[in-house]
Image (cartoon, rainbow, N blue to C red):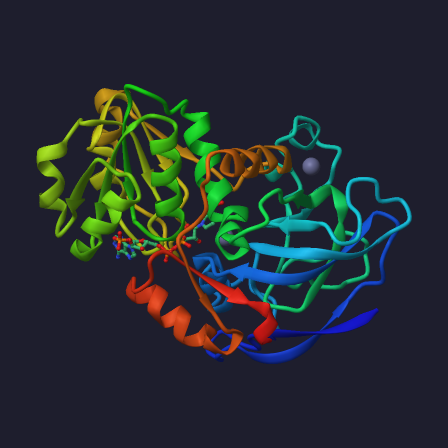
Amino acid sequence: MITVKAYGATESTAPLAPLNIPRRDLKPHDVHVEILYCGVCHSDIHTVRNEWSGNTKYPVVPGHEIIGIVKEVGNAVTKFHAGQTVGVGVMVDTCRTCKPCRSQLEQYCTTGITGTYNALERDGSGMITYGGYSAAIITDENYVLNIRQQENLAGVAPLLCAGITTYSPLKYAKVGPGMKVAVVGLGGLGHMAVKFAVAFGAEVTVISTSASKVAEASKLGAHHFIHASSPDALKPFDSSFDVVLDAISADHDYTTYLNLLDLDGKLLVVGLPEHNPKVAPFALIKNRRNIIGSMIGSISETQEMLDFCHDNNIVAEVETISMSYINEAYERMIRGDIKYRFVIDLSTL
Ligand code: NAP
Ligand code: ZN
Ligand code: ZN
């Protein structure tokens, strides 16, 4: 085992602080990645603050939007070599044998994914996984992504979660020319959803509680902006959209957004608030509306998305921060004071 520097929390009310964590010895299929950048996802905050059914194991070291350089590979590794730029996203292992795993949909593994952080390793060692707020990670090559981009790697990091989490459901809903798409919640995920929906050729509307984001939404390529100052503000847009992507991190009523859907419209839910939402059945049956949940994306789809971003010049809009700024960054994210993703420069660890 090796020890590496990291930043983490020891309890739900504690600020993140420096700590040392163990990383396993290199196994034959492992890749040792020295981390350059790690994006800050709202899931990091939910986990640190134990907002999801009390499932956080402390100490927790968050971070699942990881970009780094391969330092060393195990003797059976075929996909990567030392010096290569790589990414690690939200999952680092799955069972590899169940139907979803065999169908390249391993994010829906019937045994659950092994998360990049806050999960138990599958080797029976009892070790907890620790994420990318750290100097290095050692992980299986089958869950590592090839990064073709060589510039603006800080802007590439958020593609590993915010990117794939929005790319996958938009692809699933076959978003393309002639479709009207609304993105609700213009944060880390939401701004990537706008970029993808625009790139796929849809007519895109941003629905935001922040009036200040109007100019930014247009810079991202959105065609329209609705200020959701109250549920009433959305009434004129009843039955107006084919797809609504809901990337809201805070508790909210799904009915408000279901009402926006036209015939056979799809509410694509990716946001994961702390408490269960309400859904009015009459709003659901009207227009034969669908609510579809979506969890990240498979490794093969993540690679497809990264290559799509490389070929179409798509990166996240980021504010690069030093490691010690993380607690302030969390507060700013909760206030919505970030356009649109914080990314930690791990050279400051
Ligand atoms: P984020 O950057 O903090 O963005 C969340 C956005 O939600 C904010 O920018 C804000 O947009 C909107 N919002 C916040 N409070 C609101 C409220 N009370 N009412 C209405 N809108 C509100 O978060 P993120 O990193 O994009 O993550 C978004 C959610 O997705 C989180 O719950 C996260 O855990 C989840 N997530 C899910 C997956 C998955 O696999 N499904 C993967 C990653 C993350 P406006 O200012 O525009 O209103
Ligand atoms: Zn995430
Ligand atoms: Zn499986």
- In this view, the residue in front, 271 or 51, is 271
Residue 131 appears in the picture as rendered = no
Residue 43 pos. (x, y %)? 47, 57
Residue 68 pos. (x, y %)? 65, 57
User: Quadrant location of residue 349?
Assistant: bottom right
Residue 255 appears in the picture as rendered = yes
Residue 180's place in the image compared with 214, above or below, is above
- In this view, the residue in front, 131 or 123, is 131
- In this view, the residue in front, 292 or 225, is 225
Residue at 41% in and 69% down: 330
Residue at 76% in and 45% down: 141
Q: Is residue 63 left or right of residue 187?
A: right
Residue 311 pos. (x, y %)? 51, 33
User: Quadrant location of residue 249?
Assistant: bottom left
Residue at 18% in and 27% down: 240
Q: Is residue 245 left or right of residue 293?
A: left
Residue 329's place in the image compared with 316, above or below, is below
Q: Give the residue furthest to the front.
A: 151
Q: How many marks?
A: 0
Quadrant for the N terminus in the image: bottom right
Q: Is residue 56 left or right of residue 327?
A: right
Residue 240's place in the image compared with 138, above or below, is above
- In this view, the residue in front, 105 or 275, is 105
Residue 92 pos. (x, y %)? 68, 49
Q: Is residue 34 left or right of residue 108?
A: right
Q: Give the residue furthest to the right.
A: 75
User: Quadrant location of residue 198?
Assistant: top left
